[in-house]
Image (cartoon, rainbow, N blue to C red):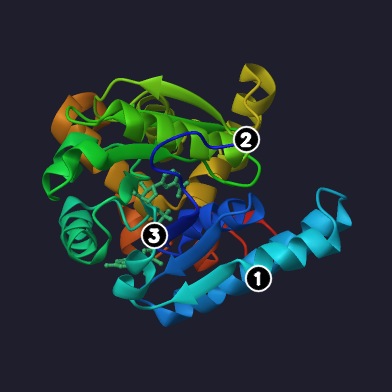
Amino acid sequence: MNTLNNPVNTIAVIGSGVMGRGIAYVSAAAGFQTILVDINVRALEGAESEIDRTFHKGVERGKLTSEQASEAKGRLLFSSSMEEGARQADLIIEAVPEDIAIKQQVFVELDRCAPKECLFATNTSTMSPTEIGSFTSRPEQTIAMHFFNPVHKMPLVEIVRGLETSDSTAEAADWTAGRMGKETVVVNEFPGFVTSRISALVGNEAFYMLQEGVGSAEEIDRAIKLGLNYPMGPFELGDLVGLDTRLNNLNYLHKTLGEKYRPCPLLVKYVKAGRLGRKSGKGVFDYTAHREEVR
Ligand SMILES: NC(=O)c1ccc[n+]([C@@H]2O[C@H](COP(=O)([O-])OP(=O)(O)OC[C@H]3O[C@@H](n4cnc5c(N)ncnc54)[C@H](O)[C@@H]3O)[C@@H](O)[C@H]2O)c1
């Protein structure tokens, strides 16, 4: 039972890309009324079919019954209107691209349309919830809830309080993540928090190794997985995260934390070529047929 003053029943998720669709899935599966919003109707359609597939696989694997899956699907709505999404939400989780200008535009608009008690969370991988809260009239109701990819499988939500975040907002975020079946860590605000700060560094270094000819992408991934006991190699992970998202993270960390985060030129070249990873069909590896390395 939620004993908080500000119970969360309805969640709006803004952005239906790699992360937003995953967050909407776990939200609906956990019993929240959920509305997934995107300005791009094709992204919303893609999200709807991927969420359907995830429910289908969940039923096949015995994680939920088909009745639970259809009830959860019934709790999930899709919309291209931010206003419609925000209007009834108790909590809004933003998952638009890692670009502070886009996030600012979104939060200014959300602040205008959301009820005054509504809480704001950002799924940013690197940025400041204090700065994001400052775009709104409710910094004490703003927090970062950093989910991981794929959201339905990864156990952690990293919770990051901004300077003005209230205790009740932090409790509500923690309670919501727990109801979604997630573990939480609460960390202090600093660019990249804990997880992105390490992951961006490892992923970027792997690109430098590929650029220097230390090994093929397959070999580097194999070495890191089998030798360092990582569940995924850095290129497999980069393609899953999205190389554009990885580059945005690095650009922000380079600006805020310095030289060691300068994005590798090979990564920049892949993004310029539109090789964004799984979501575009090709990144370091090619996913259009079966997975193979492409140089
Ligand atoms: N990809 C990952 O593995 C990962 C992991 C953790 C956190 N994050 C963070 O999550 C956020 C989203 O990343 P992603 O990988 O899902 O990005 P993505 O590019 O896959 O999806 C972003 C979506 O936002 C939509 N969008 C853009 N502007 C919008 C607007 N004004 N209103 C509504 N929708 C809008 C786009 O159409 C797109 O569908 C970023 O802050 C990123 O750093 C990503």
Query: Which of the two labelled residues, at mark 3 and mark 1, occupies the earlier sequence position?
Result: 1
Label 1 vs label 2, nearer the camera: 1
Q: Amino acid at mark 1?
A: Gly
The one of 90 and 109 positioned closer to us in this rendering:
90
CA gap between label 2 and label 3 equals: 36 Å
Residue 53: x and y, percent? 72, 66
Q: Which residue is mark 2?
A: 232
How many numbered discs sit on the rendered protein? 3
Q: Residue at x 38, y 45 (%)?
A: 123
Label 2 vs label 3, nearer the camera: 3
Task: Say which mark, if any, is on residue 74.
Answer: 1
Q: Residue at x 66, y 30 (%)?
A: 231
- Within 10 Å of disc 3 (Cα), the crowding (few <14, some 14-19, many 20+) is many
CA gap between label 1 and label 2 equals: 34 Å
Residue 53 is left or right of residue 84, and the answer is: right
Q: Quadrant of residue 132?
A: top left
